[in-house]
Image: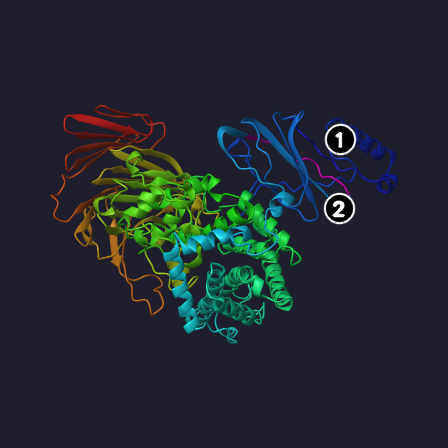
Amino acid sequence: MTKRFGVGIMGKREQNCLGSLVCVLFAVVAVCVGVFGGASRGQLRLDEREPVAEEWGYRPADDSESRVNPPSFSWRPAKGLTWEVEVSADGEFEKVEYRRSGIEFNVHCPDAVLKGGEYFWRYRGKDGKGEYTNWSKVRRFRIGDDAKAMAMPRRAELLGRIPKSHPRLFMRPENVGRLRELARGKMKEEYERLVRQCERLMSNRPATAEPAKYPAGMASGSDPWREIWWGNREYTIKALNGAATLAFTRLLGGPEKYGVEAKRILMECAKWDPKGSTGYRYNDEAGMPYAYYFSRTYTFVNDLLSDEEKAICRRVMKVRGDEMYGHLHPRHLWRPYSSHSNRAWHFLGEVGIAFMGEVEGAEDWVWFAMNVFYNVYPVWSDDDGGWHEGTSYWASYLDRFSWWADVMREAMGVNAYEKPFFSKVGYYAMYLMPPGKVGGGFGDLTAKRTSERNVSLMSTFASQARNGHWQWYAESLGGPAQADGYIGFIRGALPEVEAVAPSDLPSSRLFAGTGQAYLNTNITDAKQSVQVVFKSSPFGTQSHGYEANNSFLLWAYGERLLIRSGYRDSYGSEHHKKWMWSTRSVNNITVNGGGQGRRTAGARGEITAFKTTPTADIVVGEAGSAYEAPLERFTRAIIFVKPDLVVVFDRLAAKEASTFEYWLHAVNKISVESQHDIRVRSGDVACDVDFLAPEGLHFEQTDQYDPNPRPRIKLREWHLTGTTGDKQRSAEFVTLYRPCRVNDAAAAKATLEKVEGGYILKAGLADGEATVILPCNDDARITAGELVSKGAIVCGVRRGGGQEIVGLED
């Protein structure tokens, strides 16, 4: 690659004020600048600072591989510039394979695929006077031959696909006749359900008076505030989704009175102050559903509206659409890690499609939404299909996104499920929440989530992506289940999917993009399985995925054993912030009472190794830098000998002599006889815990949080803390967990031998014995019988007459 240098040159006026010697020096500098290809006089300079944790970053990253073809490009934004991108097969850009100029945003997805292979890319800006910046740093990337082709059509082509007449959302005008035929024939039962829903709405018509704002002096986040905040959302949905249902059903051939009532509700809601109690910036939980349900009703009932009524609706949505666009654009394209914004952008897209050609700026709203989809979505995962914010937010946000997938498919012919993420999205639920599971892993509002609650969304994924494994999951839980209302009717017209049992899949899986590993004995029946969940995430502790890195959870045979603790009484409450966001609330380790950064993208972890086999799984995470007072290391390794032995090996090094506190949490009180005789029990399932090292731990237990949730929350869970003795700079914990049914025979005791460079652990199993080498140093060489370690964990499992060896050096 060619290095490029830039040196600023003084103008004539300044040079005339200097002595002749200085002039000569500047002349020399000028020559040097010309020789090295630097910036010319007055050239604009790019801001090429490295991205911080909250920023999307330069993509494709240097020396990365793209799983889509073409890749999407992203760079640091700057005001007042349009952009030019070049792609070349050589770092000198002697032959440019792709060039696009006049790019509006700081992201770009080309409209044509590239050949598989290695490429280089760069970008530059151009201001309103036609002056260019310097070219950016050159970055190298690869496109595999198997990368998914997903080029983004140009603006005119993409927007030109949207119908000029109505309806435009979820259907096209030319498809209304086909839907009416289905309503009279194959989908008559679904249509009749819609009619019954409409009749209920007609007999109990939704209120349409504008909801009240928060009273003066009301504390934000208080329980009375929450009642208004969420109550106004539900009030808005009841009115405008009711109107959309009536209008849609009338389009299918329902009575005209449905359309008349839908129009009445629409026009009454149009009287609401667009920046009042349901304004997007005042209360986005009410403002967002207002925007998309109003738009759906408008397009479904459009033929009944007079020109004056259409003008009223357009004026309302011009204000609301501009407010949403002003909040999201262009910020979301570079700083997209805002939870609510990750649904607001596609709601704005719905508004834009409904009002395109009728409201100034609507085309911009759609183009922006499509640029988010192609270039900056999803943000809470990579192509592996996980979800940083947890299963509740996964279900909530992707269920809503699935509406946009329906809208894009019909309005613009774009298939969301061609994205690599959406080709894998259902495996997140399959591995984390096998059928029969209670508890949705890490993330807000997941503690008691059941696998049954995933049926509707997994049914959608299965039908949209044509995935037999996900269809099997839905059917094994009593599905498939259609979405409610008109969404369900639209999707009911899709072809059926044949279920495929997951017998061809491994029982454990790493979702590297979110830094979570799900270790299972099987993924077909949680009541017959043991599961370990481990997190060490590049997303850190931000947003709703706030649990500390290197935390783990343990389930067995349908029961929650070692849990994440606390109850979200209100988002951002004292309990939520000071307990649930803290390292103390999870199965983890604090140092001198301090933990990892709270709810921040900067407190990052990393899964550094992962190995899965039918016999044993090994996962290793590093989280030392995530602590508020950073550690030199916090390496946690989990070895899961299926199904009855879990070994957790921790190595910590602080920058000063410290105490180390090991936290465990359970639903019920934990029995503690000694550090080698601890039992956690839930129902008829238990887990015996043995802290093999270090000796001399001091244990305390309480059922109180610090602080407790608001008085209306009566939940209490149990928290056990094991604290080291004398302060030391480092600590090593070797802890055994034996999940079992209460009536199972006790396993043989384990032994731990300290050897040069690490430990040798021997532990009895129900049907054999496990030997595990736990090196403390990467260069340690340790031998235990047939097992040899050269600095990596090695596990030997002897059952019957043979031994299976599982190691990270394989």
Residue 266 against residue 91 in the figure, above or below:
below
Q: Amino acid at mark 1?
A: Val
Seen in the image, is 734 located left or right of residue 622? left
Magenta stretch: includes residue 257 = no
Packing grade of label 2 (10 A; few <14, some 14-19, many >=20) is few
Q: Nearer the viewer, residue 403 or 230?
A: 403
On the picture, is 784 further left or further right than 254? Answer: left
Query: Which x, y percent locates residue 430?
Result: 33, 44
Labels 2 and 1 touching (C-beta < 8 A): no
User: Between 201 and 389, which is closer to the camera in this rendering?
Assistant: 201
Its colouring scheme is: rainbow
Q: Which residue is mark 2?
A: 128
Q: Amino acid at mark 2?
A: Gly
Please give the name of the residue rendered at 61% of the width and 49% of the height, measured from the top-left corner: 367
Instruction: Please tell me which residue is depicted at 60% across the width and 37% down the height of the picture.
Output: 110
Residue 277 picture location, percent across and down:
53, 70
- Give, as a single range, the part of the protein colored magenta: 130-141
Which disc, if any, is residue 33?
1
Our reading of the magenta stretch's main secondary structure is loop
Label 1: how many Cα within 10 Å (few below 14, some 14–19, many 20+): some
Question: Closer to the N terminus: mark 2 or mark 1?
Answer: 1
**Residue 676 point in image, percent of width and height:** 19, 45
**Can residue 774 be seen in this snapshot?**
yes
CA separation, marks 2 and 1? Answer: 25 Å
Name the image quarter holding the N terminus: top right
Element carrying mark 1: helix
- Quick check: 548 above or below 702? above
User: What is the secondary structure assignment of the residue under circle 2?
Assistant: loop
Q: Magenta segment: does it hold 137?
A: yes
Left or right: where does residue 184 sit relative to residue 215?
left
